[in-house]
Image (tube, rainbow, N blue to C red):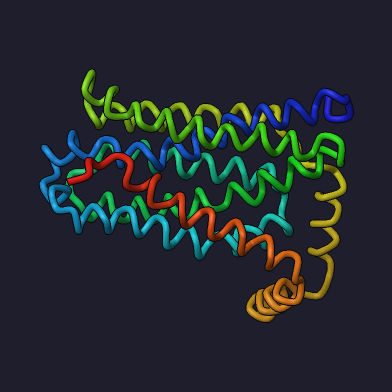
Amino acid sequence: MKNKKLYPWIVVGLLWVVALLNYMDRQMLSTMKSAMMVDIVELESAANFGRLMAVFLWIYGFMSPVAGMVADRVNRKWLIVGSLFVWSFVTLMMGYCTDFNQIYYLRALMGVSEALYIPAGLSLITDYHQEKTRSLAVGIHMTGLYVGQALGGFGATVASAYTWETTFHWFGIIGIAYSVVLIIFLHDKKDHVEQAVKLENYPKENPISGAFKGIRDVIHEHRFLDHSSLFRHAELTGLGDKELAPYPIR
């Protein structure tokens, strides 16, 4: 199955669902604030709610380069499966929260686990697709992120029909179940796995010096800096819209 021409597109389809869950689970908290603050009064404070949003984004931002280095060195299938399982378990556990601190720490853990997915997922897709289909494959995968963000907005609708606890429980269970699907059907590229094994056999490099070496190499790649600057400004512009969209302008 892995060697058929169809399998690269199966990989895109499998990871499209992961991308959807990635953005949907992080967005649900924003849309269910009104329902949650009935039981957790600390959420009535805009400052406290801002802390929940900020801890996720700060940790996600700091973890993203680390996640890229990890994805280059391990089996990406298991990194993706583990990432999905952890953030889905966090989503499930958020339905059992009874105070602000519990949500805060779970939100921080979600930032770590969700950050591990994107570098591994995109890397896997670009390995399976050559120049003729690579951009299309990445583009299709990216639609999953935004469909997930849109579906996350329905968290409030589900919470109003049932409860916010039930909403977190079921979306968490869906993600955990889907991680089992990935275990069965998702496979890493053989050459990447072989390269990871070779790295294991090399003399161990100090992880801190290795990280600084990687940063130095990136800094000297001017084309990367130009492209990253472009996307960084675009993301900063859109971030306010994405995070403020659930709140009315007063």
Occupied quadrant, residue 77: top right
244 left or right of 41?
Answer: right
Q: Nearer the viewer, residue 196 or 39?
A: 39
**Image position, residue 126 (x, y; %):** 77, 44
**Image position, residue 210 (x, y; %):** 70, 76
Task: Relative to 47, say whether 191 is above or below.
Answer: above
Task: Relative to 41, say whether 162 is above or below.
Answer: above
Q: Which of 111 and 180 is in front in this view?
A: 111
Residue in view at x 75 percent, y 76 percent? 220
Q: Which of 249 and 201 is in front in this view?
A: 249
Q: Nearer the viewer, residue 185 or 142?
A: 142
**Image position, residue 246 (x, y; %):** 29, 39
Residue in view at x 34 percent, y 30 percent? 169
Occupied quadrant, residue 178: top right
Q: In which quarter of the image is the N terminus?
A: top right
Residue in view at x 70 percent, y 39 percent? 138
Residue in view at x 63 percent, y 78 percent? 208
How many tags in the picture?
A: 0
103 left or right of 234?
Answer: left
130 left or right of 186?
Answer: right
Residue furthest out toward the front: 250
Occupied quadrant, residue 134: top right
Task: Relative to 52, say whether 3 is above or below.
Answer: above
